[in-house]
Image (tube, rainbow, N blue to C red):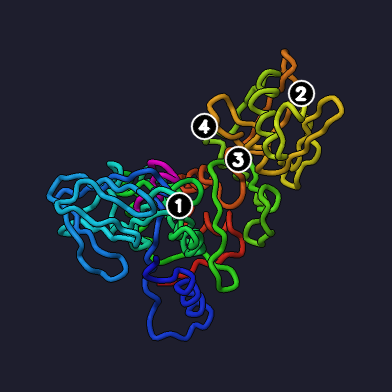
Amino acid sequence: MMPFSPILLLMSLTVAWASGARTGPPAEPMLRIGLRVAEPEVEIAAPGGLLIFDAVTGELISETPPASILRAYRDRGSIRFDGAQTPLPDRNAPVRLEARNGEPLTVDGVAYRGRLELFAAAEGGVTAVNILPLEEYLLGVVPLEIGPRTAAELAAVQAQAIAARTYAVAHLGGHEELGFDLYGTVADQVYGGMDAERPEATDAVRSTAGRILTHDGLPIRAYYHSTCGGSTAAVDEVMDRAPAPYLRSVSDRAPDGSDWCSISPRYRWTGEWSREALNGRVLEEVARMFGSRASEVGPIEDMVVVEQTASGRVRTVAFRGPGSELVLERLDIRFALRDAEGRILGSTDFDVRPSSDGGVLIDGRGFGHGAGMCQWGAIARARAGQSSEEILETYYPGAALTRVY
């Protein structure tokens, strides 16, 4: 299914980094991004038309006229197409689609660089994979991950570019069983293709090309989040992940005594969960996590913080009812305490107090998991004149900035 092995590519890069003995730098990796995974159908188009190839043999199968839309769907285990100039036979092998003249192609109306591969997903439906160089992928990631920024904040955007590049390199082959490296969503990094690109992010990507963060010669787990609330968290405080020296808790206190990330609109927040909400959507989610139905668990009468972490975040919470106590940890707490719109809890750095109707009020600090780089802290530091190197040294202590291609 795959023209190359991302695992072998990562191994070759790793050997080159570790050995230091090479005649030239490794080549820029090609990434495979899962844009649509096991979807009922996918629409693809290009201004000048599409060329359709057998992804295994490279044979040109068919083409579409300019401005036409090709609809791909699965039928009885094979990919079928509507919109091709010449009717296509059923395809149980992957196909590659390219736009004429190097133009971008669109997937469900969104423009992307590179080429596209389609195949029938094992679990049903069609999977669409965008294949493109790592640096071009970052052009559609960095703007969405850190938002629109000004020239005075360039160092923060550069730090974001390096963190996102590091994450991508470290996750080559991350979803090989599904046919790609990274999801184009929050499951990995949000990727919006060409429609998301912005000039300041493009400048940051270009000016840091090939640079990643390493530790002991390997790419680090470059986690990042919106707002730390005053202190980042050690990764094992907030996730079920092994500790790492470069992902320990770091103070975000500025010289004037304020927190760098206090400029964030999510620096402090309050949420309310009524008794009805606790015994509705929260109880259903908690019961689901324990493999039960809400009716089997019983009502929630109280929510209590049981344990906090070294950085002050909540490690465990107990939902108590008549004769029952259900305890959740780390990220599960955030997923259980969704709001009425389905958004997960802002962070696990919070205090709980009772509300007037028997529910709970939560006073929170920061936004996101809290491990690694604090994006709003990075933005404030950039405004104060700190370089991208200084920002990265702060939030990933002990990691080395390394040019790998």
In the depicted structure, whether residue 162 falls above or below residue 281? below
Q: Which residue is mark 2?
A: 299
Residue range in magenta is 139-149
141 lies above or below 267 = below
Find the distance from the CA under tag 1 to the CA under tag 2. 37 Å
Q: Residue, x 70% and y 34% (percent of image)?
A: 286
In the rendered image, which residue does mark 4 sit on? 265
Residue receiving disc 1: 183
Q: Nearer the viewer, mark 4 or mark 3?
A: 4
- Examine the structure image and report whether residue 143 is included in the region drawn in magenta: yes
Given residues 35 and 345, the one toward you in this image is 35
Magenta stretch: residue 13 in it?
A: no
Between the residue at mark 2 and the residue at mark 3, the CA separation in whole angstroms equals: 40 Å
SS for dot 1? strand
In this rendering, would 364 be left or right of 133?
A: right
Q: Dot 4: within a 10 Å radius of its alpha carbon, few (fewer than 14), some, or many (20 or more) residues? A: few
